Amino acid sequence: MIKLDSKIPQGPLADKWTSYKNNQKLVNPANKRKLDVIVVGTGLAGASAAASLGEMGFNVKNFCIQDSPRRAHSIAAQGGINAAKNYPNDGDSVFRLFFDTIKGGDYRAREANVHRLAEVANSIIDQCVAQGVPFAREYGGSLDNRSFGGAQVSRTFYAKGQTGQQLLLGAYQALMRQVNEGTVKLYTRNELVEIVMVDGKARGIISRDLVTGKTERHFGHAVVLATGGYGNTFFLSTNAMGSNVSAAIKAYKKGAAFANPCYAQIHPTCIPVHGEFQSKLTLMSESLRNDGRIWVPKKKEDAEAIRAGKKKASDLSEDERDYYLERRYPAFGNLVPRDVASRAAKERCDAGFGVGATGLAVYLDFASAINRLGEDTIRARYGNLFQMYEKIVDDNPYKEPMMIYPAIHYTMGGVWVDYELQTSVKGLFCLGEANFSDHGANRLGASALMQGLADGYFVLPYTIQNYLADDISTPRMTGDEKEFIEAEKAVNDKLEKLLAIKGKRSVDSIHKELGLVMWDFVGMARNKAGLEGAIEKIAAIKKEFQTNVFIPGTNDGMNIELEKAARLEDFITMGELMARDALNREESCGGHFREEYQTEEGEALRQDDKFAYVAAWEYKGEDQAPELNKEELIFENVELKQRNYK
Amino acid sequence: MEKTINLTLKVWRQANATAKGAFESYEVKNISTDSSFLEMLDILNEQLINENKEPVAFDHDCREGICGMCSLYVNGRPHGPDDEVTTCQLHMRKFKDGETITIEPWRSAGFPVIKDLIVNRNAFDSIIAAGGYVSVGTGGVPDGNAMPIPKVDADEAMDAASCIGCGACVAACKNGSAMLFVSAKVSQLALLPQGKVEAARRAKNMVAKMDELGFGNCTNTGACEVECPKGVSIANIARLNREYLKAKCLD
């Protein structure tokens, strides 16, 4: 049993973070120079943390698997970043951002963490502006805002449809400045393959140089993981091809609890699947729902005719269309949260009203916005997204509505962390999408960028000092200690073992099989029998992988198939964990929808008396069932209600 | 409705940085014209693995045209025969049945080959490290709206900032110059009041680093602009030259 101490500070909600900062331990500048921090990942959370820690004077080693820190998948975030600036004077406040995030997360997040997030959000905007991030502006020169799902105010700052790119480049540039100053040493094309524990604390990592294939031993007084989510367990997702869960699984196997793995976000507006060869799914930003209206035909005959290619969307008159989000949720309309919009799309398609060749698509229509505002305005707002759509689908979205369907996009679950972002392993911290902390069971749009940068710029640089202050007289290790040597040997033995299987199947073919099981049984709608079956199917896939995978080449030099195989092993562990958690959670909340638990109208039905807790899973050994630990969620400032967006 | 094509691929294979490379030919069949170019390469690799051969190594990640990881010289053009796309956004509908496609890595002194189609672009990080930022630390900055910025300047800065650092400009340039890449960052930051303060210094340091790393000079052929997947304009190079000249005058 892991003792889960969330370390939430005492006192009123709005004072907790201030009081934490006033009372925490700090490390003086002379001592910072003596302390090494390993940061794994260079996305928004990793790059901002590495840059900030470097500026403070720590010795930072920063790792990424791509050729440059700028490639991290945060770069692909399109729509925007939330903050409670209230520049539009539309009634926003820190409390309201906190409240919307808690409610959007279906009351499954920690109040204290979310409030802190809302508090520091405004500083992020200021920081990014100071870095030269070219946010969209009004003619008067002030920052522009737009609205996103789950909120009734406009609090989203954006840079065209490339907000993630611009924020990441801001953090990347801050990072490269520190590289230039010598406070951060960068390791590119270099992957964490093991976490090294010394006397019960995380003290370093074993990494693998992906060009030479050689493993390396790196010491750190603390290790920070900012390695993203586990959406690629599904094979097809909006994540980048290289996004993987391996660092988090290494942490899990070293004793870090894994929290709420079943909370995966299915994004409603992605380009539909079109063939077996497909390698990934492309997101169309949620911001499109500001001006786009979602619909399917009212009559099944029309839907059938469209699927058969006999009719087009534009052949249908206004009253032959069912704008089902506006119909079901008049208050929020097309801007309901993502989980609600995704399920509503699935419901219509399952009922036979879907469009596109497969029937698994709905329309996202800009005709009324183009009539109202003109094509130029729409082009200025979403030009790059429209272009992206046209390149992929070969259809002009200014003329015909886009076709979209939900896809796996983000994972709210992750490594369990306390208020200080420390995992249940001492000295091991976890930031950004990789941790579980702030989004509950569903993340609102434009909140991922906010959380990643909050953790990296404004939370970890404080909280890590509270840990490191006790470590100022711990001398640096050389990496030649037995713990490092043994960990390195185990890694290489494992890789050789994978290479020696010499079976018949490619890594991808097994990963695709896992993905289909995940999508069918651990996807948008789940039930007991399906989940139990999925756990068995995943066990069979694991066996197939261990006995029948074929990896060409050797452990010497670059071997991409070997990298993928090692990651797939961890995705299989992750898939099983997701299914187990989904089976345990006998309620529906946010991104987790159990068919047995829904209201008469088909909305998610929570069971607050039984499941208002964080499910933190503890590793018990290979082929052993993990153990469930519970952290009760205590709500003192919001009243738990069924979410209502009507 | 789905159309498929058969192709011959001439692919550059090179075991590592020091090995001698050569073209190898492969046949791929029944490729859907709706698949992307990289999905076609996935199919080739699956085929090679099933024949117990080593798959072709190529760089890729986001597969939606924003990370800048994918590269490839396809039939003599960086990112292949379509405009304003990255290779991952290039679709097979741009090719004809029976066509032979030549696939090479970026070829430039600044980007040495690592394996097959993968090159080393660390030089771009070094150029950014030389000055491609505003020298501001975390915290202690003014309110985001404290300084109004004209919309046209913000928009122009955004256009320059849309560079994805893929290196197509260098690969397209007969001189192997990185001027479009450097100028995009110099322009973005020079256009904004936050970056203006150190604009001249930035231009000088970034250009010096570019020269040091073996990139060539700009002779205004404009090939970079044509091949840039994000449509970054060579007007940025003019702005870089102004900033650079200013810096030299101040010396």
Image (cartoon, coloured by chain):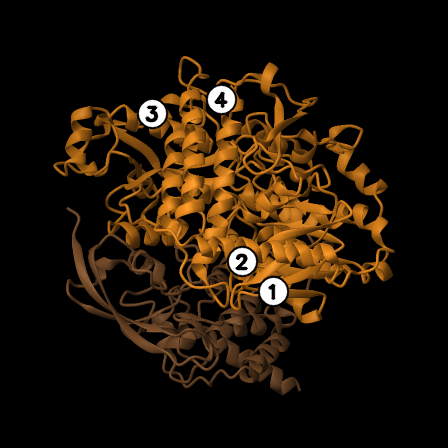
Specify the label residue A187 is tagged with. 1
What is the number of the mark on residue A134? 2
Query: Which chain does brown denote in the image?
Result: B
State how far apart marks 2 and 1 are (Cα).
28 Å
Kindly indicate whether the residue at mark 1 contacts the one at mark 3 (C-beta within 8 angstroms): no
CA gap, disc 3 to disc 4?
Answer: 16 Å
Task: Kindly identify which numbered label has been placed on residue A588.
Answer: 4
The x and y percentages for residue A147 are 49, 38
Closer to the eye: label 2 or 3: 3
Asked if labels 1 and 2 touch by Cβ distance under 8 angstroms, the answer is no
Nearer the camera: disc 4 or disc 2:
4
Residue for badge 3: A347
Image quarter of residue A416? top right
Comes first in the chain, label 2 or label 3: 2
Tag 4 secondary structure: loop
Q: Are marks 2 and 3 in contact (CB under 8 Å)?
A: no
Chain letter belonging to callout 1:
A
Residue A94: x percent and y percent?
66, 35
Instruction: Name the residue nearer the viewer: A380 or A323.
Output: A323
Q: Which sits in the foreground, B175 or A598?
A: A598
Q: Residues within 10 Å of mark 1 (few under 14, many from 20)?
A: some
Return the disc, 4 or 2, that comes first in the chain's sequence: 2
Chain seen in orange: A
The Cα–Cα distance between marks 2 and 3, rounded to whole angstroms, is 40 Å
Name, please, the residue furthest toward the left.
A310
